[in-house]
Amino acid sequence: MSMGIERSMVERLAHMTEAKRWEFIAAMLPEDALRLDADFEAWHADGQAPPSADGWRVWLMMAGRGYGKTRAGAEWIHRLAMSGRRRIALVGASIDEARAVMVEGKSGLLTAAARRCRGLRWEPSLGRLKWPNGSVATLFSGENPDGLRGPEHDFAWCDELAKWAKPEAAWDNLQMGLRHGPRPRALVTTTPRPMRLLDRIRAEPWTVETGGRTGDNLSLPKAFIEVMIATYGGSRLGRQELNGELMTEAEGSLFPRAMVEAARVPPLTLPPLCGGSLPLPQGERGTFDRIVVGVDPAVGTEGDACGIVVAGRREGKLYVLADASVSAGRPERWARAVAVASAEWGASHVVAEANQGGALVESVLTAADSRLKVKLVHATRGKVARAEPVAIRFETGRAFFAGVFPELEAELAGLMIGGGYDGKRSPDRADAMVWAMTELSETRSGVPRVRML
């Protein structure tokens, strides 16, 4: 099939209805479909084409899942690599993801270059891709900003920016090294998620933005698109992950500020038997049938805090009662803080994450107070996935914040629909709250621990 026939076929597809387009593609001979697929420039969507405007430095392609961001990125990088002796940075959320998606994936560089370039050499042990004309692409990670400190590049491809563990530092180091050649440029391909860095990039005068929806990709199975739209269409998750819409904080966060404010009740002071002296507001008096302390232990003596959050259950509703989190330090320090919080609130037991430390977490806690009853829990899902059922409780009026907890609420606001975290520090307080609230949600019985007078 000649190039003219391929372009003629693309023109025919462009004027067809969606139903006719799918029917036409399904009836194509395999060899014709492969040739058409290889001629990406002939059929790509408008949002997958490099900007035609002059003077841009950053091309931001923000689109729904399955739109074809990876294929577009791979085609752009390969074309630039073949245009001269280039130095290229390939930056993924992790080295493993950069390798699996950007290079070795079915839409990655090896596939994009295979039909048009002989002699391309992939050196996985070095994280390096070499073209026969001397161009070199090197893998970097958004979780290791220092790896980008120093190297100079002509071009860069940054994939899934919204998933980078240290986005600001990694991006800044990349930009400082993007100074080789006459016109350095970067492509960012990402599913939209609210984050400060993305807002900053969009606001720069040298950024050009393109995008599209999941359904715009002709290569995706029609049945898949129909199922996705039927399942998620119209929802916040669907608008973000399928339509490629960038949500505002209130839309993109699992715990938007408006929802937190709506779920706020007056602080519940400690009852007299636990050392408190101030009376509870009239509408908040009653009996908690169970109070627990959730703990996200600190791994080291520096850096992240130890999340310690007290929560209670009454009449089927859950309440965040206190944030007793402490900054990182020796295990004895945060263990003592857990023991104090448990004693002050009359908690039935402590729920502690044991993914890092295991039995050591329990031994440190019981050493601080031998009377502590400790339940160890293991994280089998990501932080956001664990938090989703808890967020639904707040949204539906079955959970409340008894007071104001600025640091905890800031971490909760950073938990994003569909996964990811947009925050300066690890969400230790948020994780501790989720463990406590989950434990109360699953507990069906219990002896009343504290009577509020």
Image (spheres, rainbow, N blue to C red):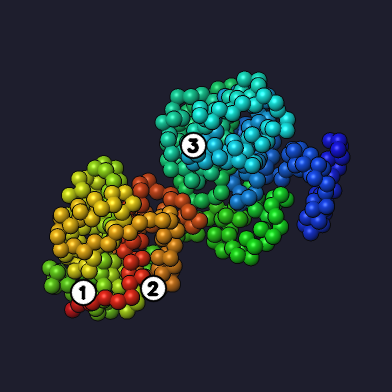
Instruction: Choose the circle earlier in sequence order: 3 or 2.
Output: 3
Q: Nearer the viewer, mark 2 or mark 1?
A: 1
Horizontal relation, residue 161 to residue 347: left or right: right
Q: Say what amino acid the circle numbered 3 marks.
A: Ile
Quadrant position of the C terminus in the picture: bottom left
Q: Nearer the viewer, residue 346 or 323?
A: 346
- Label 3: element kind: helix
Q: Position of residue 84 (x, y in %)?
A: 66, 21
In the picture of the structure, the residue carrying the numbered disc 3 is: 95
Instruction: Choose the circle earlier in sequence order: 2 or 1.
Output: 2
Name which residue lies at 43% across and 39% down: 143
Q: Where is residue 235 in the image (x, y as percent from the top left)?
A: 56, 64
Observer able to see residue 263: yes
Q: Say what amino acid the circle numbered 2 marks.
A: Arg
Checking the image for residue 449, the label placed there is 1
Q: Is residue 274 positioned above or below 430 on the image?
A: below
- Label 1: element kind: loop
Quadrant position of the N terminus in the picture: top right
The reply to whether callout 1 and callout 3 are in contact (CB within 8 Å) is no
Instruction: Choose the circle earlier in sequence order: 1 or 3.
Output: 3
Checking the image for residue 398, the label placed there is 2
Q: Residue furthest front?
A: 359
Name which residue lies at 41% across and 69% down: 393
Name which residue lies at 58% across and 58% down: 239
Q: Is residue 241 positioned above or below 235 on the image?
A: above
